[in-house]
Amino acid sequence: MIRKAQKEDCSRILELIHELALYERAPEEVTVSLEEMEDAGFGVNPVWEAFVAEIDGVIQGIALYYIRYSTWKGRRLYLEDLIVTQEMRGRGIGKLLFDKVIEEMQNKGYSGMVWQVLEWNEPAINFYKKYHATFDSEWVNVSINN
């Protein structure tokens, strides 16, 4: 079952984020607290939304996104994370979640959807190629940490 995330899902969402960080070889990079995640998604000024994939009452996948603004394209949906637990990969859960996010983008009238994928993550790259996604090698990721 695919549904919108609720505040009580945050602890399980955070577990999946930690699992992804292990897969991406950066477990120490996850520093967000449960309280911050709950406030950022369900507090006074929520900044993210998510769909969850539930099997037998257990969340086995998430698609967490937010809206960004492009001065060239207008409102665009930014897919922050698409995660399916390792034991549930290959069963179509990622496709169901990804399709739901695309549907959300279309229903809200956004100009498109953007996301990132690690260059060595061949399974994810091959998944996105099935959607005829455009891969951009010109832009470099830049950030500042506080």
Image (spheres, grey):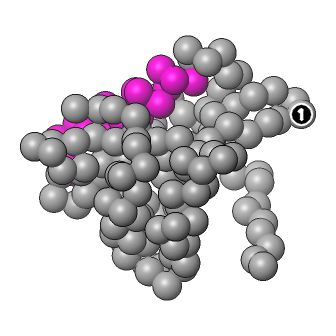
Looking at the rendered structure, the secondary structure element under dot 1 is loop
Q: Eyeballing the image, is 66 above or below 88?
A: above
Residue in the picture at 89% in, 33% down? 71
The residue furthest right is 71
Q: Residues within 10 Å of mark 1 (few under 14, many from 20)?
A: few
Q: Is residue 123 visible?
A: no
| Most frequent secondary structure within the magenta stretch | helix
* Horizontal and vertical percent position of residue 79: 55, 43
Q: Eyeballing the image, is 114 above or below 73?
A: below
Quadrant that contains the C terminus: bottom right
Circle 1: residue type? Thr
With 50 as the anchor, is 145 left or right in this view?
A: right
- Give yes or no for residue 124 being in the magenta stretch: no
Quadrant that contains the N terminus: top left
Q: Nearer the viewer, residue 78 or 127?
A: 78
With 3 as the anchor, is 107 left or right in this view?
A: right
- Give the residue number, with chain letter if any, for mark 1: 71
Q: Eyeballing the image, is 75 above or below 67?
A: above
Q: Is residue 43 visible?
A: yes
Q: Nearer the viewer, residue 68 or 3?
A: 3
* Horizontal and vertical percent position of residue 38: 51, 57
With 20 as the anchor, is 32 left or right in this view?
A: right
Q: Nearer the viewer, residue 124 or 111?
A: 111
Residue 16 in which image quadrant: bottom left
Magenta residues (range) = 89-105
